[in-house]
Image: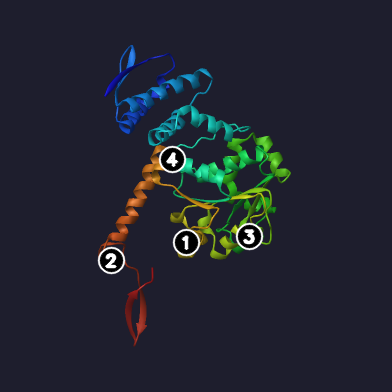
Amino acid sequence: MIKKAIEITPGIEPLYGTHDENLRLLEDGLHVTIDLKSEAIHVTGNEDSVARVERVFSDFESLRKSGVNLHNGELHGMLKMIVADPSATLKSLIDSGKQRSSGTKRLVQPRSINQRRYVEAIEQSDMVFGLGPAGTGKTYLAVAMAVSALLSKKVSRIILVRPAVEAGERLGFLPGSLQEKVDPYLRPLYDALYDLLDPPKVDKMLETNVIEVAPLAFMRGRTLNDAFIIMDEAQNTTTEQMKMFVTRLGNNSKAVITGDLTQTDLPNPKKSGLLEALHVLDGVEGIRFCHFEDTDVVRHHLVQRIVRAYDSYGRAQQELPLSMGEPVLTEPVISNGESKHVVKPQ
């Protein structure tokens, strides 16, 4: 055990986090004790852990002086990765984020280990499935990686696809152009684009079809070359639609498929093309599956607790005996002139 004093420099306070939560994260994750004194920060622990804490402080100071100011959400996420991965440093994470973010308004930086694995899988594989609950960054990071690939000229276009389940076969009867018909279903993808790029630039790319948005049904028969293709809400695809989509991949193209199997809107969730793809494509070379958990939620901190509460409730309902679960629906049946009730299929 050693004890090291780290000098307090002006502007270092944001590193502490709200109510010192970042310091508590370093303490718990690296098994050290951090004491804030008026003249210095005293860190006690084994030599390696103390050195890692010292590196966090020195990197933060260096980045701050170079003009990199991290808000607490980004910083807390990066500190989680530093705690989990001894090879990770604030500087290395920022450097890799800058490479992915060249030309964009925001630093594209994973905030959890699973997000980091997801981003690395997209960089290394031609087809990646991102699965997990709402708010885990599946769609946003996919769009960010697509924009990065486009701006660095690795691909010549971005294609955004989403199944319009609510409209079904009535899509053709909705008023307006094709673009106006599918826009409500693709709003989350647009939101990510406008967050990453200046609106006039996005609008220009949409006008020239450098960025194309289309309902899944319009992908049939196409071969998508030199493109970064994203299908969002893939849990709402049928088996046939999923097979059709994954076989559209052309030369020099990359596909990312995102979805949440707990939010399937199909009449029969067990027939989800995404669910079947998990089994059919498992082990196929060149395809990666990345799974997210409630701890990866990067929206308001309350969302993480909401996701966890729903998961716990769902598990509890499955474990309850029938008599203690949800009320059993019954329906009347006339037999031999008598009215009887039978259990209605759930």
Residue 322: mark in rendering: 2
Which scheme is used to colour this image of the protein? rainbow
Percent of width and height locating residue 293: 41, 47
Q: Amino acid at mark 3?
A: Ala
Residue furthest right as drawn: 208
Q: Which residue in the protein does label 1 denote?
A: 279
* N-term mark: 2 or 4: 4
Q: Residue at x 25, y 62 (%)?
A: 324
Q: Which residue in the protein does label 4 denote?
A: 113
For numbered disc 4, what is the local secondary structure?
A: helix
Q: Quadrant of residue 218?
A: bottom right
Q: Residue at x 61, y 43 (%)?
A: 146
Q: Amino acid at mark 4?
A: Ile
Question: Horizontally, is 26 left or right of 193 in the view?
Answer: left
Circle 2 crowding by C-alpha within 10 Å: few under 14, some 14–19, many from 20: few
For numbered disc 1, what is the local secondary structure?
A: helix
* N-term mark: 1 or 2: 1
Q: Residue at x 59, y 31 (%)?
A: 105
Query: Depth-wise, is mark 2 or mark 4 nearer the camera?
Result: 4
* N-term mark: 3 or 1: 3
Q: Which residue in the protein does label 3 denote?
A: 217
Percent of width and height locating residue 148: 61, 38
Percent of width and height locating residue 179: 67, 50
